[in-house]
Amino acid sequence: MIPTTALAVLRRAVPTVALLVSASALLLLTDRQSAKRDLPAIAVLQQTSSMVLEDAVKGMIEGLAERGWVDGKTVTIRRYNAEGDMAQANAIAREIVGGPFDLVLTSSTPSLQAVATANARGRLKHVFAAVADPFSAGMGLDRADPLVHPPHLVGYGSLAPVNATFQIARRINPRLARVGVAHNPSESNSRRFMELARASCKALGIELLEAPVENSSGVIEAVQSTIGRGAEAIFVPGDTTVISAVESVIATAAKSGIPVFSVNPGKPDRGTLFDVGFNFREVGFVAGRLAADLLAGTDPKTVPIRETAHEIPPYLVLNLAVDAAAPDRWRVPDDLKPQARYLIDQAGLHEQPDAVLEGPFDEPPPR
């Protein structure tokens, strides 16, 4: 039994002990938060929730981790998504530039433009990827000299081979005469793809049936309008607005019995006849490694704007199950099948990891 006097002493000591414990816990929490703030901080902005941009962001994070920059351990990473809203993208970009970040990664042309505008004074180092043609984005880049760029802004262009894509379409259907395309003319990347598509179609004798859109809600109506004008296939360019609705584009075209082809490989068996383009996880990965170099001290002024194709070759997806739906018009040549990294037939999906798509990738075609 504890004496009454000892109990009294304990009672008087309890508040003091509790205060000391609370103070110690607060100091420990403060130390942890301080340590966390001492880690480099990275913001990542993507324009929409499309598979292409999601893959690019995943690749960015993996590229950073490969060089030792692991979220929560050696760096803190915060992801943002504008969900297709340009006003929201601009607001997020201002928040990022005014926030506690050392570097920002962007996935998509609109995200590049939003952050570059907000970061015009160069407060943050900025690495971009999943941008078809950064030289046409109005960010002070020079196509003739890749070292001409704002001193804080570097990244990768990933312009898929449009001319080769239309050449493949013509090989699969030698009688192809009319192709429909929805596109958002306010996107600089889309404008570049359309320049190349028009030139390719002119050279091949294909009529390109265009339908401009302002947002994703108008994509399906635009696609239907080209089908009503006689489109025999639908082309999906590197257009963020259209890509965000690509599954609906495929379903709409399928109802009319016409195929879809694109320069945006996504899920191989999603229903396109074929796709030519890049693995955007790989695209993001090389950008993540570049960001890691900047965190390690590389001066972005010394880094040229790079083309993804110099490090990652484009690849081909072929869906023979779609081909079989109209064998009288769409027939994949036998010599094209071994060139597909992913080949889908009635038996399912087959990966051919060593497949190489043969060029030439003569971009841009003559205007």
Image: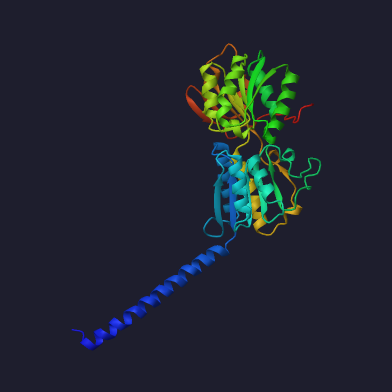
Task: Farthest residue to the bottom: give it.
Answer: 5
- Relative image position of residue 272 (x, y in whole percent): 56, 25
Q: Is 207 or 343 nearer to us in this picture?
A: 207
Which residue occupies 43% across, 74% down? Answer: 24
Residue 317: name its quadrant. top right
Task: Farthest residue to the left: give it.
Answer: 1
- Relative image position of residue 14 (x, y in whole percent): 32, 79
The quarter of the rendered structure image containing the N terminus is: bottom left
- Relative image position of residue 274 (x, y in whole percent): 59, 25
Which residue occupies 69% across, 30% down? Answer: 193
Is residue 51 rendered to the left or right of residue 16?
right
Q: Is 62 or 226 nearer to us in this picture?
A: 226
Question: In the image, is residue 70 above or below residue 14?
Answer: above
Which residue occupies 55% across, 20% down? Answer: 253
| Tally of numbered discs | 0
Confirm whether residue 159 shows in the render.
no
The quarter of the rendered structure image containing the C terminus is: top right
- Relative image position of residue 243 (x, y in whole percent): 58, 32
Task: Farthest residue to the right: give it.
Answer: 144
Which residue occupies 76% across, 27% down? Answer: 365
Question: In the image, is residue 361 above or below residue 328?
Answer: below
Residue 279: name its quadrant. top right
Query: What colour scheme has been applied to the protein in the rendered image?
Result: rainbow
Confirm whether residue 262 shows in the render.
yes
